[in-house]
Amino acid sequence: MPWVAIVSAAIMWIILLFLFNKETAPEPVVVDPAVVANISKEYPTVGKTVFEQTGGCAGCHGINGQGGVGPALAGDEKILKDPVYVHTIIVKGKGGMPAFGDKLKENEVYAVANYVLNSWGNKIEEPLTPATVAEGQTKVDPAVLKNRSRFVPEDLKLPEIFLGTFILVLLTYGLIGLYSVWAEGLELHPGIHKVRSTPLATLGILTTLGLSILFSVLFVRQMVTDYAGWGAKEPVMPNVTAEGFYAAMILLMIAASIGLYKKYFMDGEVLVEDASGEFPW
């Protein structure tokens, strides 16, 4: 039964990942042929107008992209290597920059993006189009990866929470069952059971205790680093994945140490309930 529980939990975990990946997949971009046809013609004029007047981009990035309150855009190799990044930032915003997805028309978004990508020394081979954005969105979005690294992602819904809880119950039952078989055997025999430690068991318990201390140090260091990142001038998202990994490893190492101690260092006693009692099992 413990193995059945673990295998069932693994199957449900695969189903949960499938559901979560399906929900966090990027939305497809509708390609408007009229927009594509006008992009190359519009961006030198419409893009310039949006950048300098309508969108107010020049107020932060400078009239010639030299930077100011916002970062410099002139000669920026990062945006030339990933033009879709410019579109994403314009639509969704980032840090102190507001989102313009609901303030600009679609043609204005592409116009100003291409204006930035083809001005002040910047130059891309092909204009940024909805097709380019759609191709870029087939990759896993960094925001999705960041969201998955949290303990409770914002878009995790009630059915997924229920399924995840059931998976944890099955795993807990299975692991306790396997541990019971390993520590106490398939059958419990009445009486006092004396145990004798071995050099390998001693090495194992010392190793697990040492690793628990190591992971505790790493956990504290990560927490200090993340706290400093939050307090920086430009706040950095905490590495929740590393924090969770170190915390989990601390608990696992302590559990392993307790298991080794019970198996090889602690004498046990087995009592058998009378079959006629209230609890016959």
Image: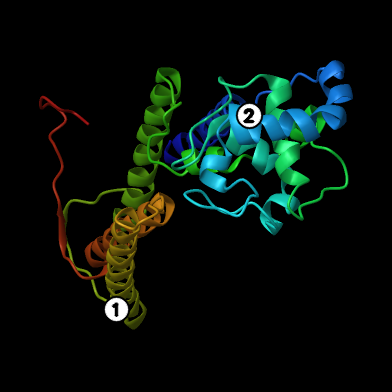
* Residue in front for this viewpoint, 238 or 281: 238
Q: Who's the residue at 69% across and 50% down the image?
A: 79
* Residue in front for this viewpoint, 237 or 157: 237
Q: Who's the residue at 56% across and 21% down the image?
A: 103
Q: Who's the residue at 62% across and 22% down the image?
A: 104
- Residue under pointer 2: 25
The correct choice, above or below, for 277 with respect to 224 in the image is above
Expressed as whole percent of the image width and height from the top left, the position of residue 64 reads: 65, 49
Residue 18 visible to an observer of this rendering? no
The correct choice, above or below, for 28 with respect to 281 in the image is above
Tell me the quadrant of the picture where the C terminus can be found. top left
- Residue under pointer 1: 202
Expressed as whole percent of the image width and height from the top left, the position of residue 174 reads: 39, 41
Helix, strand or loop at label 1? It is helix
Give the farthest residue toward the left.
Answer: 277
Q: In which quarter of the view is residue 112 placed?
A: top right
Q: Amino acid at mark 2?
A: Ala
* Residue in front for this viewpoint, 188 or 30: 30
Expressed as whole percent of the image width and height from the top left, the position of residue 221 reads: 31, 67
Q: Is residue 19 left or right of residue 40?
A: left
Helix, strand or loop at label 2? It is loop
